[in-house]
Amino acid sequence: MSGAGAGQAHQRAAILSAIRHGLRRGALPEDQAAMLRGRMIAHPRHIIPARTALDHAGLIALFTANAIREFCTVAQIPTRAELPRAIADYVRAQNLPMRAVAAPHPALQAIDWAQEMIEMRFGRAEPSDLVSIQEGFAGIAETGTLLLPSDATTPTTLNLLPDTAIVALDTARLFGPYEDAFDALRAAGAPPCHGMPRNVMLVTGPSRSADIERTLELGAHGPRRLHIVLIGDDATAATG
Amino acid sequence: MQNTSPAFSENVATALHDPGLQRALGRAKKPFAQVRANAVAKLPEFEALRDTAKAIKDHSLAHLDFYLEHYAAMVEAQGGVVHWARTAADARAQILAICQAAGAKTVTKGKSMISEEIALNDYLAENGVAPIETDLGEYILQLRDEAPSHIIGPAFHLNREDWEASFRKAHTHLDPDRVFAEKRDIQAEARAVLREKFLAADVGITGANFLIAETGSSVIVTNEGNGDLTQTMPRVHIVLASIEKIVPTIEDTLSLLRVLARSATGQEFSVYTTFSTGPARATDLDGPSEYHVVLLDNGRSNMIGGEFQDMLRCIRCSACMNHCPVYLSVGGHAYGSMYSGPMGSVLTPAIFGLDQGHLLPNASTFCGKCETVCPVKIPLTGLMRHWREREFERHLTPAPMRYGLGVWAFMARRPALYRMATRLSAWGLGILGRKSGRFRWLPLAGAWTRDRDMPAPEGETFFARLARQERGA
């Protein structure tokens, strides 16, 4: 599809021709174009911060420390079987009703939520939902950032509408730099968009603004609280 | 917004005597530099990343035509629509047509400087589509019918009482006697009011920090999450972006993101960095069913290959204005353009013409701080100097300044006379200002000393000292 007809073709041609005039050449010769296409296919990395070169325990520690600094809370449990208890404890501590909307992801749907009396709905978030549970695709230790792609099992609205957002993340999904997490995303996807789902959110802490007199306040338009539950039997339990 | 750059001098006088503005500027001055310095200190690779960032943008601009075409093809391969717009008027018409085709009554908007540049809000409103700004700062400016005074903190010139007064006036459906005990109560009210707007809007318009050629993705960076709600909830998402936002790959984008937040707010990373690629897929449970990109030129292609091409590297972080002694004294409104500070002084004449913006490149002490903090190493003072030369060539320089420059040139071409005159004035002023080291008032320099002190010379000229030192005295 392209924007409306002949007028569009004219505008496009005019912009490209003005750029080429400035660059003092015509359309890029085929050998150079091939080189640039090669660069996109190889998508080379640039400088990767040395702080991300860590072993698995180091990644967990750095991710946790950075996420807490960005006003997340972090819990760690050994296996997925403990997830209902961990979430129930958290929801109770916030004085919230035991009700949540969760991503229709197999790893969350396989869990028996009723054992902790959590009333669970699977699907996208609606404006009335107070608590959401998302399945994290990756965690990035470099800055305590979550990578949350959209698809049929992980809708985007879960990351945005509820006041309290909870993300479950296997510690095996922790990476050092952003580049490693995107490599995992590319490996999971297919052409033509190089593994890019419609929406990929990199989330670093709960929503905030400092627009009023430069004072930082949490809960601008997105979640006021972001709670991360790390699942893996390694290292000591994190708290925050 | 109305460009008032030609009234820069009058705007400055107003700004210097606006106590509310001066209070806001005083609040920002130190933290602006401090937060960036702290973030930079925590990343040893930062300086090297500035070179990387510059190289990525230079590479993208040198092949801009190729990457734009590749980007457009990728967007279209995923069911998105690309609209090419040469001028502001073209972009406005295209956006209105999309809104009308969608039967839109209200449009929510993420923060977009391009939208300010093309004066989109007024145009939509005149044509029966109500635009609603959702960035907290942009929202209150819309309520107050004001222009942004900073490219990322648009309302930083306002004080708490301004927020309270505007909200009481606008939100008439709420209890008029409600109390705003804390600043967070103000924010909570905006959240509640705007949440309804997000859900009701037919179209969401966002800007883009980057467009990725490799994947056909648009990238936005926010802390509030308003941009994400804007592009997720309505049925139609329009991305409004200028052509120089193109970068080749995700990896290139990640390197630029590493310098962006640190240079802007001193954060290691912004809260939400979101990549959007086409409309909702068949199995998606949410997301817009239409995805449009309006690619705006508006004078940028003319900057390619010329002496102002370096300016197209700008990633709109605001570090230059946050460190500019002129900006921090007069704020953003004085510049009369949505682009203020050093980056605005270079960009405004390029986009709106030298007639409109010729005074702004003079709003610099050439201290060069802007260049030392720019994450993509734009030679801002050099570019301002180019504009000053063009201004002089086109006889746009104000008469007193031309006269002054003429006197200076006359002296400078006669070194003996020049040295004698400077020696005399340095000696005289040195004696007169010996006590305090500065002047609060000087004859013929009242306009200067009204708002700042003039430092007193030490009694000796540079040439005299150099000569003395060379003699070994």
Image: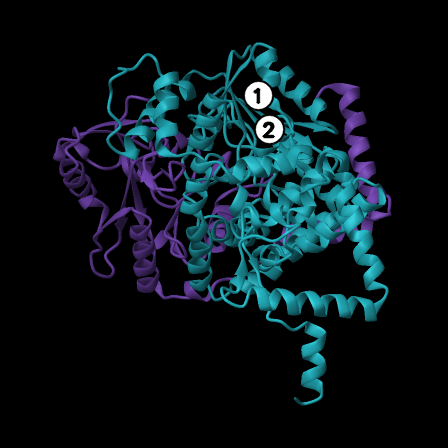
Chain colours: A purple, B cyan
* Circles 2, 1 touching at the beta carbon (< 8 Å): yes
- The residue that mark 2 highlights is B115
Residue A1 seen:
no
What residue is rendered at 60% in x and 68% in y? B430
CA gap, disc 2 to disc 1? 8 Å
From the viewer's perspective, tell me whether residue B232 is left or right of residue B429.
left
- Residue B401: horizontal and vertical position, in percent? 75, 46
Q: Position of residue B71 (x, y in %)?
A: 67, 38
| Residue B453, image quadrant | bottom right
The label number, if any, that marks residue A16 in the structure image: none
Compared to residue B376, the image places residue A212 above or below, namely above
- Left or right of B415? Residue B295 is left
Q: Which residue is mark 1?
A: B121
Question: Which residue shows up at 47% across the image and 60% down it?
Answer: B40
Please, which residue is most extreme toward the bottom here?
A: B472
Vertical placement of B120 versus B23: above or below?
A: above
Please provide percent x and percent y for residue A96: 17, 31
- Total label count? 2
Q: Give percent across and percent down for residue A38.
A: 69, 53
Please state, as top left, top right, bottom left or bottom right, where the N terminus of chain B lies in the image: top right
Give the quadrant of the C terminus of chain B: bottom right
Check the residue under mark 1 and report the chain it is in: B
